[in-house]
Amino acid sequence: MPRPILATIHLDALRHNLSVIRQQVGNSKIWSVVKANAYGHGLDRIWQSLMQTDGFALLDMNEAIYLREQGWQGPILLLEGFFEPADLHIINKYRLTTAVHSYWQLDEIAKNQLDNPIDIYLKLNSGMNRLGFTPKAYPQIVSRVRGIKNIRSVTLMTHFANSDNEVGIDEQFAVIERLQMNSLPHCLANSGAVLWHPKTHGDWVRPGIILYGASPSGRWRDIADIGLQPAMMLQSEIIAIHELPKGEKIGYGSRYTTEKPMRVGTVACGYADGYPRHAPTGTPVMVDGVCTQLLGAISMDMMTVDLTPCPQANIGSIVELWGKNLPVDEVAKSAGTIGYELLCALAKRVPVTVV
Ligand SMILES: *Cc1c(COP(=O)(O)O)cnc(C)c1O
């Protein structure tokens, strides 16, 4: 019998979430962001459930080639652009759309012999200072791009730093508006902007995390009413039970001491499965459908949970680490991170089933 840990990927949830996004954005087209192996869900497992999308956005040439070879005919966008001149031939061969954020990339596009002109997303640095051309330089670059025969179309692309929090997008949006690039199609919105800043929707949107049913803000309550469904559930089982008297210590570092007699369970899931090692005592976990808490440190392969609220629990009881009943955002918040990181970090050793 295999170790009783399992991730379940719900394709219906992905389909449903895409349709929720479709309702939110009206006529804007949707790049489904499937970078990082579809946020840990497995690009190979899930891409067909998103066939209703208008395009797929990702980072890795190999993931782009994979989608083409699997038969996806629609647009594919390289969010970070290309990394070396030789990549241009892959872009050409596989008909990829590429972000362009640096002068060297423009130079390469201009000077190389390409079979077909390419579509580019010209990245504007509207304030995040990660990738892109400054607002000052942008109009001149657009003029230059117009003269490059190897370029078929140009879309203005930028990325928001605060679409999911109180700061919002106004400052960055004003930078975009001041440029008055109304002749260019616009692609601005990540998940936070899709949900909370409709004026940014433009021609194409780029949602990632909400496709997978988690929150861009890291707060589940922020998306609870939107009807998104978690696409990944991580489950394990109780593999041992201990009845402990008061004053017993639990796990590495003896970080937890029982304050009363307690029944505790050992769960076959640890940080080598992708569970965050920093999750402290009190982090929520579901046992047999009842919400309870972690106790003490997370080990590589195991963790300990409090069985006080679920006296019926026994060896073999199902433990949900995150999923349909326990939002990954809640676990992430407790561990001082975001749902994105937990989903992406699902370890290779965890068996995955697709339903
Ligand atoms: C990852 C990414 C997105 C999607 O972000 P979410 O917050 O997951 O919606 C959109 N655009 C770019 C450029 C990205 O890198």
Image (spheres, rainbow, N blue to C red):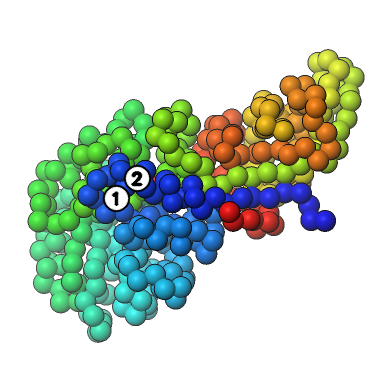
The amino acid on which the numbered mark 1 sits, given as a three-letter code, is Val
> What's the CA distance linking mark 2 and mark 1?
10 Å
Drawn side of residue 39 relative to residue 4, left or right = left
Please indicate whether residue 101 sits to the left or right of residue 19 in the image. left
Residue 126 image offset from top left, x and y in percent = 24, 46
Q: Is residue 305 left or right of residue 221?
A: right
What's the amino acid at mark 2? Ile
Residue 205 is marked as: 1
198 up-or-down from 30: above or below: above
Disc 2 on helix, strand or loop?
helix
Which residue is at 86% across, 33% downward? 241
Q: Is residue 86 left or right of residue 283?
A: left
Measured as percent of width and height from the top left, residue 285 is found at: 67, 32
Residue under the image location 38 percent in, 55 percent down: 32
> In which quarter of the view is residue 318 placed?
top right
Whole-percent x and y of residue 145? 15, 67
**Residue at (30, 41) in percent of width and height:** 24
* Element assignment for label 1: strand
Which residue, given by chain and number where applicable, does mark 2 sit on?
Answer: 21
Residue 131 seen in render: no
Q: Residue furthest top?
A: 260
- Tell me the quarter of the image containing the N terminus: bottom right
Q: Are marks 2 and 1 in contact (CB under 8 Å)?
A: yes
